[in-house]
Image (cartoon, rainbow, N blue to C red):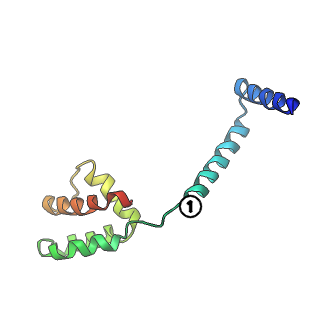
Amino acid sequence: MKNLLILIVAIAIFLHFYPQPELESWFEEQKTMVLSEFSNATDTKVRLNPEKIYKDLQPSFGQFNEEEQTFVRTITSTRESVKEFYNKYCENKRPTPKLHQKNQQLICTKISAYQSLF
């Protein structure tokens, strides 16, 4: 047992002072795989349904023109597109050329209500 511990410490010291790029890349791949497996295993499946945001915005569609309504439909088509829109235009408060400023604020307000489910 003592010899095994000495061997492990010796290998750790060797790798610390003489890094091996192939070994480090393999380790990073394995680490990424393990973290993704843990993430999948512990996922609660409570996720944002983009259709919910679209339904919340439907009563306000009177102030949206047809192009804006189509753009909202594309935004709310997938969870990733909602997240991308929120990160790009809502968090950074950048205007989008496809929406009027008040409509963009309304969309950002509706999305921020579900931000914890991203």
Q: Estimate the x, y position of residue 39 in percent, counting from the top left.
A: 55, 57
The quarter of the image holding the C terminus is bottom left
Query: Measuring 28% from the left and 50% from the top, which residue is drawn there?
Result: 91
Residue 52 screen position, x and y as percent:
31, 73
SS category of the residue bearing label 1: helix
User: Where is 13 relative to 86, above or below?
Assistant: above
Of all residues, the one furthest to the front in this rendering is 1
Q: Residue at the location (77% across, 28% down)?
A: 9
- Which residue is at the front of the view, 19 or 37? 37
Residue 51 visible somewhere in the drawing: yes
Left or right: 100 in relation to 89: left
Q: Is residue 14 above or below residue 113?
A: above
Residue at the spot x=74%, y=29% of the render? 12
Residue on which disc 1 sits: 40
* In the image, residue 55 above or below residue 18: below
Q: How dense is the environment of label 1, judged by Cα within 10 Å: few (below 14), some, or many (20 and up)? A: few
Residue 102 in the image: state x and y as whole percent: 13, 60
Judged left or right of residue 44, residue 49 is left
Q: In the rendered image, which quarter is residue 98 located in?
A: bottom left
Quadrant location, the N terminus: top right
Q: Position of residue 112 (x, y in %)?
A: 27, 58
Camera-nearest residue between 91 and 7: 7
Instruction: Determine the image quadrant of residue 40.
Output: bottom right
Report if residue 98 is visible in the image: no
Q: Of the residues shown, which amino acid type is indicated by label 1?
A: Asn
